[in-house]
Image (cartoon, rainbow, N blue to C red):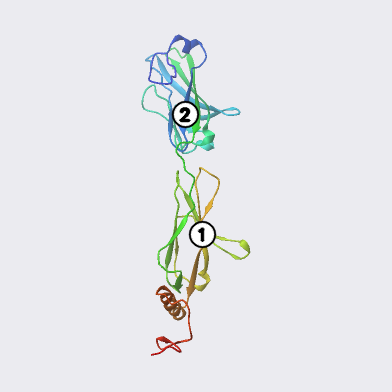
């Protein structure tokens, strides 16, 4: 005979055969993987016929089905791509769930059916309650923008990159926006780095990024960065003025003339 268990493969006690299914409680960490064990002692007198896993929320739903004809089938959309059942190891039909969601908290039932040599059928069940909890999780911090070029005034036709950085766990997702008229901002990208090629005057404006992860529904916004795209002649004059400001000239006394300010002694 065979019976699902909750640990290593053991001959089932009489209470497992005639009494209610044994119930185990396990904790899983959100976004991690977990195995819900279901094992039985194989017998030469019985052949595994069918394996079914069910989950109970408001109602009991079949989430996995295996038999000789249909193979393995994941039947609930929410588990597609992240659920599997052990195979190839006689007596082990444990359930593996990847990337646990908080909504995976439920009572799970492993149901195995066997066919005896005399064609009689037996079925056994084992239940496991899964509680998904949050571990060491940190919401996304306020992001910071870093420019690839140490200038916010750029020539027409040039290229620049802006990098959005934030800390937090689990993985942070980023979005880039350009402020628009009437508070209608334009979404530009969904990666940490925004690259702007062949800049035109129309690319001038204020840019900002947002950062968020699954810990909190709050989206954190960076301070905006102003980019100005100018023709090369005007840009040269602006860059000269910026350089003068850096070395301490804070006020212009008169028009610039031949490398000096008008009115200054030669």
Report whether residue 75 is seen.
no
Quadrant of the rendered image containing residue 12: top left
Determine the residue positioned at 48% across, 79% down. Answer: 251
Q: Position of residue 185 (x, y in %)?
A: 58, 61
Q: Where is residue 140 in the image (x, y as percent from the top left)?
A: 48, 48
* Mark 1 neighbour class, 10 Å CA radius: few under 14, some 14 to 19, many 20 or more: some
* Mark 2 neighbour class, 10 Å CA radius: few under 14, some 14 to 19, many 20 or more: few
The correct choice, above or below, for 59 with respect to 210 in the image is: above
Image quadrant occupied by the C terminus: bottom left
The residue closer to the viewer here, 13 or 23, is 23
The reply to whether discs 2 and 1 touch (Cβ–Cβ < 8 Å) is: no
Q: Position of residue 143 (x, y in %)?
A: 48, 54
The correct choice, above or below, for 1 with respect to 195 in the image is: above
Report whether residue 135 is seen.
yes
Q: Where is residue 41 in the image (x, y as percent from the top left)?
A: 39, 17
224 sits to left or right of 94: right
Determine the residue positioned at 39% across, 86% down. Answer: 259
Q: Which dot marks residue 223? A: 1
Determine the residue positioned at 43% across, 11% down. Answer: 13
Q: Name the residue under label 2.
A: 27
Q: What element carries label 2?
A: strand
Q: Which dot marks residue 44? A: none
Image quadrant occupied by the N terminus: top left
Q: What element carries label 1?
A: loop
Q: In front: mark 2 or mark 1?
A: 1
3D distance between C-alphas at marks 2 and 1: 40 Å
First reached walking from the N terminus: tag 2 or tag 1: 2
**Image label count:** 2
The correct choice, above or below, for 266 with respect to 97 in the image is: below
């Amino acid at each position: 005979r065979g019976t699902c268990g909750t640990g290593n493969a053991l001959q089932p006690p009489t209470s497992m055969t005639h009494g209610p299914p044994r119930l185990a409680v396990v904790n899983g960490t959100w976004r991690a993987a977990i195995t819900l064990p279901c094992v039985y002692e194989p017998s030469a007198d019985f052949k595994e016929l069918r394996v079914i896993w069910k989950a109970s929320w408001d109602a009991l739903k079949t989430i996995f089905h295996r038999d000789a004809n249909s193979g393995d089938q994941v039947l609930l959309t929410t588990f597609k791509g992240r659920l599997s059942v052990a195979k190839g190891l006689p007596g082990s039909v444990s359930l593996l769930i990847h990337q646990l969601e908080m909504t995976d908290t439920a009572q799970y039932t492993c149901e195995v059916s066997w066919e005896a040599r005399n064609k009689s059928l037996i079925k056994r069940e084992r239940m496991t309650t899964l509680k998904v909890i949050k571990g060491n999780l940190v919401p996304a911090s306020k992001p910071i923008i870093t420019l690839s070029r140490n200038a916010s005034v750029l020539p027409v036709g040039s290229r620049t990159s802006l990098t959005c950085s934030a800390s937090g766990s689990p993985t942070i997702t980023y979005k880039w926006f350009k402020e628009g008229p009437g508070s209608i901002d334009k979404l530009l990208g969904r990666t940490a780095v925004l690259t702007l090629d062949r800049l035109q005057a129309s690319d001038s404006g204020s840019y900002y990024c947002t950062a968020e992860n699954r810990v909190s529904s709050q989206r954190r916004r960076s301070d905006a960065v102003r980019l100005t795209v100018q023709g090369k002649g005007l840009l040269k004059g602006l860059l000269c003025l910026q350089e003068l400001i850096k070395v301490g000239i804070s006020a212009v006394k008169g028009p610039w003339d031949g490398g000096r300010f008008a009115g200054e002694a030669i």
